[in-house]
């Protein structure tokens, strides 16, 4: 088998750069969707846990900071706060991987999941008007989900391969 220097073949470098760009794009899209799924797990469960803990808290929260501190000690509220902090950190990573116009609408699926959790676990009544709104959110999520996760700038691997970094 003969080894050939790719620089001897015109266009070979650009083909490799294009393949590298496609791989980087696929990697970022996969990473973006994994982070969105993590966010969609943490955010609704965090909200459910926080709501459950505060609905079962003996006092109504008021301007008194001591009541808030006592509410935070509720195990469900503390678990919810922890999950929401992790969801926030996940969202920060997501901002570095995907466009805002892609990420934010997809994470709106958390509203759909949260509404279902409220109905099932908190015995909340959801009117037909709310279900219609939830359906519209879901349709928007489906439309945005078919687009590219990153449309601005170059992916770091692509920029390094093309020599622009």
Image (cartoon, rainbow, N blue to C red):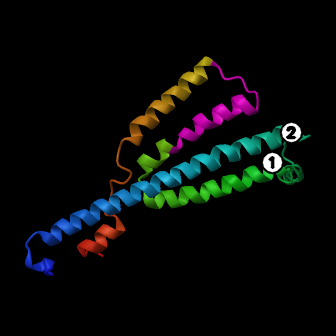
* 156 to the left or right of 141: left
Quarter-of-image position of residue 131: top right
Q: Residue at x 70, y 44 (%)?
A: 47
Depicted 142 relative to depicted 102: above or below: above
Q: Secondary structure at mark 2?
A: loop
The image shows residue 83 at horizontal and vertical percentages of 69, 53
User: Which quarter of the image is occupied by the N terminus?
Assistant: bottom left
Q: Which residue position holds label 2?
A: 56
Relative image position of residue 48 (x, y in whole percent): 72, 41
Percent position of residue 160, x then y = 30, 74
What crowding class fits label 1: few (fewer than 14 Cα within 10 Å), some (14-19), or many (20 or more)? many
Give the residue at x 76% y 45%: 50
Picture quadrant where residue 126 is located: top right
Q: Residue at x 52, y 61 (%)?
A: 93
Residue at 64% of width from left, 37% of height from top?
A: 114
Return the x and y of residue 23 as percentages of the image width and height.
32, 62
Horizontally, is 139 left or right of 16 in the view?
A: right
Confirm whether the magenta stretch covers residue 114: yes
Q: Is residue 71 above or below residue 113?
A: below
Closer to us: 65 or 163? 163
Left or right: 68 as drawn, with respect to 4: right
Provide the residue span drawn in magenta. 107-127
Most foreground residue, 10 or 54: 10
Pointer 2 with pointer 1, Cβ within 8 A? yes
Q: Which residue is the site of mark 1?
A: 76
Which residue is the extreme one toward the right?
A: 58
């Amino acid at each position: 088998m003969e080894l050939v220097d790719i620089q001897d073949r015109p266009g070979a470098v650009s083909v490799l750069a294009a393949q590298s760009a496609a791989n980087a794009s696929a990697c970022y899209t996969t990473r973006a969707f994994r982070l969105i799924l993590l966010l969609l797990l943490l955010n609704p469960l965090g909200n459910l846990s926080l709501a459950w803990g505060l609905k079962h808290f003996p006092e109504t929260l008021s301007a008194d900071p001591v009541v808030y501190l006592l509410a935070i000690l509720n195990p469900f509220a503390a678990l919810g706060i922890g999950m929401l902090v992790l969801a926030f950190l996940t969202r920060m990573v997501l901002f570095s991987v995907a466009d805002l116009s892609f990420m934010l609408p997809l994470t709106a699926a958390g509203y759909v999941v949260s509404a279902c959790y409220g109905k099932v676990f908190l015995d909340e009544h959801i009117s037909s008007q709310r279900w219609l709104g939830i359906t519209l959110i879901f349709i928007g999520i489906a439309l945005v989900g078919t687009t590219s996760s990153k449309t601005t700038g170059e992916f770091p691997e692509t920029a390094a391969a093309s020599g622009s970094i």
